[in-house]
Image (tube, rainbow, N blue to C red):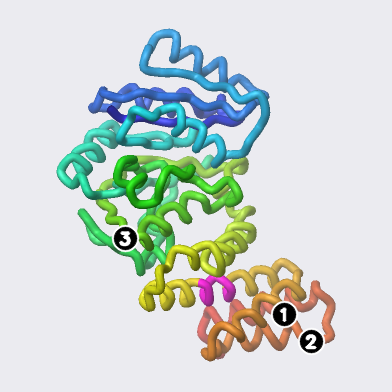
């Protein structure tokens, strides 16, 4: 039996398409719990439209807003008898064969902790050309894999296109909630990373079996990029350090990932007009690594200059464009 969690918060505009994509799956042995995080729109009413005609659907409504990942965990806790779990956000949807393909992979590879497919991105103004995995420079090979180094480089696992093998995951990391509520934007990424660091295997289906909708109200919107960068610095700087078990390979990967995230965060902070924050990240980077990047050195000089924050940001943008166009590399 597959357990499906559809977390909702003011999702009435998208929820019907999401639930219909579940009901139309070629694999029919599933249970769905819609966990509403105290919506103020018609999300609960829309969910009841489906639940009244489909006994496989249950609804849980929270009296107060707990946040997205606490809502994920709540839904998972409501499906204790399901060995396989999927979390499908209410603004996303599946292709017809997602469940069938994912279940087949887990049945044939029972040691796998999670299965993930690719996912297409749909914007309000139309569909983007690149898929979720297509945006990643570092990707796993199809089938069973332990592509940990690639995962440290970039998050190639679309959460809406993932199925979790709960008995395997529980054996690896215990009974703690899967998604860390303290991470508003990167709890799913931290879950994949922690599982891989602890020795888990995954399975990649190289097909586009899910779709995620890009819109202003979601956590993955570009406006939240700076906060996501801060969380990734926290993950690679502190949180993953408790999972390393003395492995030199993992320590090397972690430090490399932290160096990369500190660099990006410093650059973005400077561009957003926060040179003091950027300077702190650049100083941390100097302590972490003996390597010196030209663009990092330029950013450091700009941060230490007597210019105003606005002029520093403008100067950095010009330098960054020149660097990206290879004018002074």
The answer, for residue 209, to whether it is visible in the render is no
Can you name the residue that lies furthest to the left here? 108
| Rendered image quadrant of residue 23 | top left
| Rendered image quadrant of residue 13 | top right
Query: Which residue corresponds to the image point at 38% horizontal and 67% vertical from the top-left?
Result: 137
Can you name the residue that lies furthest to the top here? 52
C-alpha span from label 3 to label 2 = 46 Å
How busy is the neighbourhood of tag 3: few (under 14 within 10 Å), some, or many (20 plus)?
A: few
Query: Which residue corresponds to the image point at 70% horizontal and 77% vertical from the top-left?
Result: 280
| Residue at numbered disc 2 | 305
Q: Looking at this view, is 35 or 12 the one in front?
A: 35
**Secondary structure under the numbered disc 2 in the rendered image:** loop
Mark in front: 1 vs 3: 3
Start-end of magenta stretch: 258-263
**Secondary structure under the numbered disc 3 in the rendered image:** loop
Quadrant that contains the N terminus = top left
Query: Which residue corresponds to the image point at 26% horizontal and 47% vertical from the top-left?
Result: 207
Q: Are marks 2 and 1 in contact (CB under 8 Å)?
A: yes
| Residue at numbered disc 3 | 199
Asked if residue 260 lies in the magenta stretch, the reply is yes
- The answer to whether residue 157 is left or right of residue 140 is right
Mark in front: 2 vs 1: 2
Q: Tag 1 or tag 2, which sits nearer the N-term?
A: 2
Residue 191 image point, x, y percent: 44, 52
C-alpha span from label 1 to label 3 = 45 Å
| Residue at numbered disc 1 | 315
């Amino acid at each position: 039996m597959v357990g499906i969690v559809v977390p909702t918060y003011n999702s009435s505009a998208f929820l019907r398409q999401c639930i219909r994509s579940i009901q139309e799956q070629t694999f029919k042995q599933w249970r769905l719990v819609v966990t509403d995080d105290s919506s103020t729109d018609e999300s609960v009413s829309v969910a009841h439209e489906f639940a009244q005609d489909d006994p496989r659907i249950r609804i849980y409504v929270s009296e107060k807003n707990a946040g997205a990942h606490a809502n994920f965990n709540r839904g998972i806790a409501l499906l204790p008898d399901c060995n396989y779990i999927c979390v499908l956000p209410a603004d996303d949807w599946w292709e017809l064969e997602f469940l069938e393909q994912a279940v087949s992979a887990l049945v044939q590879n029972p040691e796998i902790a999670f299965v993930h497919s690719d996912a297409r991105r749909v914007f309000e103004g139309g569909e983007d050309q690149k898929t979720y995995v297509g945006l990643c420079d570092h990707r796993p090979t199809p089938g069973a894999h332990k592509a940990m180094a690639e995962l440290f480089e970039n998050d190639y696992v679309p959460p809406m296109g993932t199925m979790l093998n709960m008995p395997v995951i529980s054996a690896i990391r215990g009974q703690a909630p899967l998604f860390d509520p303290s991470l508003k934007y990167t709890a799913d990424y931290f879950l994949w990373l922690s599982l891989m660091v602890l020795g888990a295997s995954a399975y990649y289906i190289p097909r586009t079996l899910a779709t995620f909708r890009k819109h202003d109200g979601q956590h993955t919107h570009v406006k939240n990029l700076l906060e996501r960068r801060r969380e990734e610095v926290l993950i690679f700087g502190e949180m993953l350090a408790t999972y390393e078990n003395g492995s030199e390979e993992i320590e090397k990967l972690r430090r490399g990932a932290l160096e990369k995230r500190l660099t990006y965060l410093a650059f973005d902070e400077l561009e957003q007009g926060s040179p003091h924050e950027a300077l702190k990240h650049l100083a941390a980077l100097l302590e972490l690594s003996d390597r010196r990047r030209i663009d990092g050195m330029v950013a450091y000089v700009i941060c230490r200059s007597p210019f105003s924050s606005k002029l520093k940001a403008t100067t950095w943008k010009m330098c960054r464009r020149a660097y990206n166009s290879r004018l002074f590399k």
